[in-house]
Image (cartoon, coloured by chain):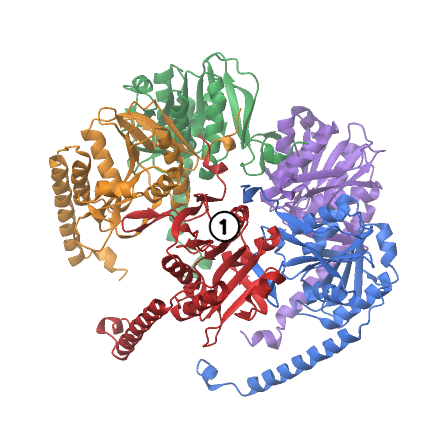
Chain colours: A red, B orange, C green, D blue, E purple
Amino acid sequence: MPDRAEEPFVQVIADRIESKNPIIMGGFPGMGLIGNIVAQYLIDQLDMKPCGRVDSKLFPPIAILYEGLVKGPVRIYESAEKNLVIIFSDIPIDPIISREVGGGIVRWAKELQPREMVSLAGLATTGEEHKVFGAATSQEGLEKIKGHIELFQMGTITGVPGVIMNECLNHGLTGICILGETRGPNPDPRASIEVVKAMNRLYGFDLDIKPMEEQAEEIERMLHQLSEQIGEAEAKPSKDLTMYG
Amino acid sequence: MPDRAEEPFVQVIADRIESKNPIIMGGFPGMGLIGNIVAQYLIDQLDMKPCGRVDSKLFPPIAILYEGLVKGPVRIYESAEKNLVIIFSDIPIDPIISREVGGGIVRWAKELQPREMVSLAGLATTGEEHKVFGAATSQEGLEKIKGHIELFQMGTITGVPGVIMNECLNHGLTGICILGETRGPNPDPRASIEVVKAMNRLYGFDLDIKPMEEQAEEIERMLHQLSEQIGEAEAKPSKDLTMYG
Amino acid sequence: MPDRAEEPFVQVIADRIESKNPIIMGGFPGMGLIGNIVAQYLIDQLDMKPCGRVDSKLFPPIAILYEGLVKGPVRIYESAEKNLVIIFSDIPIDPIISREVGGGIVRWAKELQPREMVSLAGLATTGEEHKVFGAATSQEGLEKIKGHIELFQMGTITGVPGVIMNECLNHGLTGICILGETRGPNPDPRASIEVVKAMNRLYGFDLDIKPMEEQAEEIERMLHQLSEQIGEAEAKPSKDLTMYG
Amino acid sequence: MPDRAEEPFVQVIADRIESKNPIIMGGFPGMGLIGNIVAQYLIDQLDMKPCGRVDSKLFPPIAILYEGLVKGPVRIYESAEKNLVIIFSDIPIDPIISREVGGGIVRWAKELQPREMVSLAGLATTGEEHKVFGAATSQEGLEKIKGHIELFQMGTITGVPGVIMNECLNHGLTGICILGETRGPNPDPRASIEVVKAMNRLYGFDLDIKPMEEQAEEIERMLHQLSEQIGEAEAKPSKDLTMYG
Amino acid sequence: MPDRAEEPFVQVIADRIESKNPIIMGGFPGMGLIGNIVAQYLIDQLDMKPCGRVDSKLFPPIAILYEGLVKGPVRIYESAEKNLVIIFSDIPIDPIISREVGGGIVRWAKELQPREMVSLAGLATTGEEHKVFGAATSQEGLEKIKGHIELFQMGTITGVPGVIMNECLNHGLTGICILGETRGPNPDPRASIEVVKAMNRLYGFDLDIKPMEEQAEEIERMLHQLSEQIGEAEAKPSKDLTMYG
């Protein structure tokens, strides 16, 4: 019986990928949850097929359930038609292990000789806009995004997207990071819409953004109601709470 | 003299298992202690034979005693007649090591080519009911439990049961988790009864639940008396305590 | 030059043991310091010869001195005549390393094909009695102690004695634990006397307990005096102390 | 797929270095940011070419961006004409890993048979002067700097420069450390100018320090304005702040 | 490029030692700094030659400078004439690594087949005297020191000296520890003088203690002045300080 201690930190367990020189995208939870929201939208709209998982003994010991079925927390989907592979994560990756996880993904991805590796992420700013920024590991990658999205002039990219960029540099792969401007860690559907629009421009995905806009409006309506209720609650504090005042 | 450092994190020390393609069940302490209570009841009622232990250098350094005899903290029992193997734990498994323990168990179990791996666990809710929920790692496993118990629609399974489910997914085994609805970490004999009933429905064990019901009533009577005594004590606080009031 | 990192966690450095199938006893500091007191008494009364040491890179970096000579903190003694080996520790073993230490001892002991491995320990209770309890890893071991000492019905044995019991179970050795009832961590000569009497009954050592009783009376006299002095001191608190009252 | 755990702690990923027996310099963030400022100035003024990176799994998981392009946090530049190699770091190296990083650099550098290894650093004092101090690993190195800069009589050099000095000693390389006197961790352009002047004297670089002086004046003007604004702000504290006074 | 992770914890980097069966002494910072003071005095007075260093990746990342030259923090000196080797440390060794450091030293020393290994250290007591105590790992070593210094009857020796004693025991070397009685961690030149006198008696070094006595008087004069100044300062506290009173 082999010892668990010998198990690699990060394992990619995947079926054979049919795509040739695919674009490989990563959607991990981060600022505005943009990585997740956009990746999930692509998976749904492009009807991508589940084809594997990323597992790690460094992940928290939990199983994730959808409709009674256990899913791995980090899953791989493919659209052979679009020559596209997406790695989607349900769980935030602790910074301590993001290097291991990002490195494991790039080592696996390299075998597929990807055309490029694209990280979807958020960029926290204090502004009101929802610009989309991009960065690349090579001049060639930079040319590709120029004109379509803003260049991320100076700064840092943290977490799994940052590690994937560094590892692409180390392994000679073309890495691209698409960052949606957002205001913090809360899910930001508006910023996600702008990233999806950028994906349409960059990759010709021709995705309908209507359903996303409707969902965004729905969420905004709910948040508005909630804030009104909280406003009233703050005006008339409950007796119970004032007892401790 | 070999060094202890070379010892695997988790060892399964077992006699030859006679069952062919057994059902392998795990009963670990958790919410409502349901995993333990139900596993112990099955072991007793099906007159299962001890046939091994799970040991780990990550376990706390304690020996557990029953009637003067040392037992390992995590033990394996078999009923060759029922084609059933149960792994029973006296000790709660620290989340930090649950991945190692669950992984070691699945690696050992895989050699036995089990029909399915069943984790018995509790599901903490705020309700008054004692529903029994189920989850599976495959559509095939899901079909098996559908109709007999509720499907656990969305959520997470933590600890050793969660790890066992993930590892079944990784190793291509059919994993099933049976979760009794309970209200917290205290032993819940009523929820356990419902899980035993579900075992009867799912596996045709035909177990008599009378002794369990009598035990539950006994416990409830004791808890009721205890709460009355505490109620009186609270009504007339002792002088000593009021001195600090 | 070999690297210290390659050194095993626990090393037994011993001369050739002459005893055939010896009884191997362990006396480690614990409740009532009974393990130490009894082991030291056996070593002295049976005129046992020093024949080795247990060392570990996990031990604290201290040298222990008796009359100018450095001794290892954990030492091995042998009486070839009595077919007896005793492992005696001056230092409490941190729970974090007790598994390594107990495991290293059992692996070494196994080579000697011991008749049985006996751990001397204390059992903390709230009672006034000094009963002696026993536990074993096998029915055979249990038969041996039955009638001579009480059976330890249910509970746990912690620390090195607990680990030694578990490891005996894992390696198929007969492990016996003799526990003197005591009230806490302070040295308990009265409880130790009862354990020595039990050793006489179980192993026919025929040890004179007079010197131990005299020593116990001496200690009790000292403690009595000390408590009277403290009592007077408490009645007339010093000015310095009351300044902070 | 090789496991990330097998990856060395520190990797140098570099093109072939053309220089023969080069001078290898290190510029890491430290007191007065002198290491960085001077190294960056040399790279710019001598028009040095990027030729590699130092990477480590111990570095923080961030990618660093300049004008949309990802750069490694620690980069190598070469001027074949000047027989000069510079290792430049954008990130402060945590003391915990500075030994690994410095050691990895010296092991790589040794292969190039460098004439000498020069660490650029700052020396925090309470004085107003901007003296430049030097230290060396050999009498030969000391002779080289004597007369040009002050000798660092007694004290310690910490961080990567200190490790590089120790490792040069261990590997028989000539190590030299050039330390600009400064008052703390803030960027100190005046101290950096003095270090550049010392480089001119020691290595005949003949660098124009005009641009550096203009930049220093610019920074000082900005800091002066800022301190006046703060001074006014302190004289007239805002209402909001005084509410908490 | 070999990985730093493969580097041994402790390395001794030394020239060929000319002495045959030398006495090897260790002077590490400890109580009263006696180990350092005495070792340094022997190195100076016996005109010992530097011949190596002890290095460890567990040492703090600092380079130590004397007159512009980098020295390793732990250095080896030899007097072939006196058949004497001294290991001298500028840095206190953290208890966590003292086992590694002491072990590495003894493993290296063993190759030289030393006549004996002598640790110079301090022993903190509450007394006013400056007795010199000794301990040994063997009866033979004890005979050597008896009559010349007091026997350290019972107690413990901590840190590198304690580890060296234990390791001498493990490796069958004669270990001797010479401890100067002192009152705490501050440098104690008077206690050091007594240890040097003991060295004269034990090893016939015939060292002049005049310079040491003069230095001690100088230090005492300075401390006396300092304490008078502090006394005056305490009598007339500064205005600034009383503002916070």
Name which quarter of the figure residue E35 lies in: top right
Query: Is any atom of residue B88 visible in this view?
Result: yes
Name which quarter of the figure residue E143 lies in: top right
Q: Position of residue E8 (x, y in %)?
A: 65, 38
Q: Nearer the viewer, residue A228 or E207?
A: A228
Q: Position of residue B210 (x, y in %)?
A: 11, 36
Split into 4 quadrants, where in the image is the N terminus of chain E?
A: top right
On screen, residue C127 above or below E191: above
Say how many tags the image has: 1
Residue type, label 1: Val
Position of A227 compared to E206: left or right?
Answer: left
Position of E22 compared to C181: left or right?
Answer: right
Residue wearing tag 1: A101
Q: Nearer the viewer, residue E170 or D168?
A: D168
| Residue extending farthest front | A81
At mark 1, the secondary structure is helix
Q: Position of residue A51 (x, y in %)?
A: 41, 47
On screen, residue E88 above or below E171: below
> Residue at 37% of width from left, 29% of height from top?
B111
Q: Nearer the viewer, residue C59 or A174?
A: A174
Label 1: chain letter: A
Q: Position of residue D242 (x, y in %)?
A: 47, 83
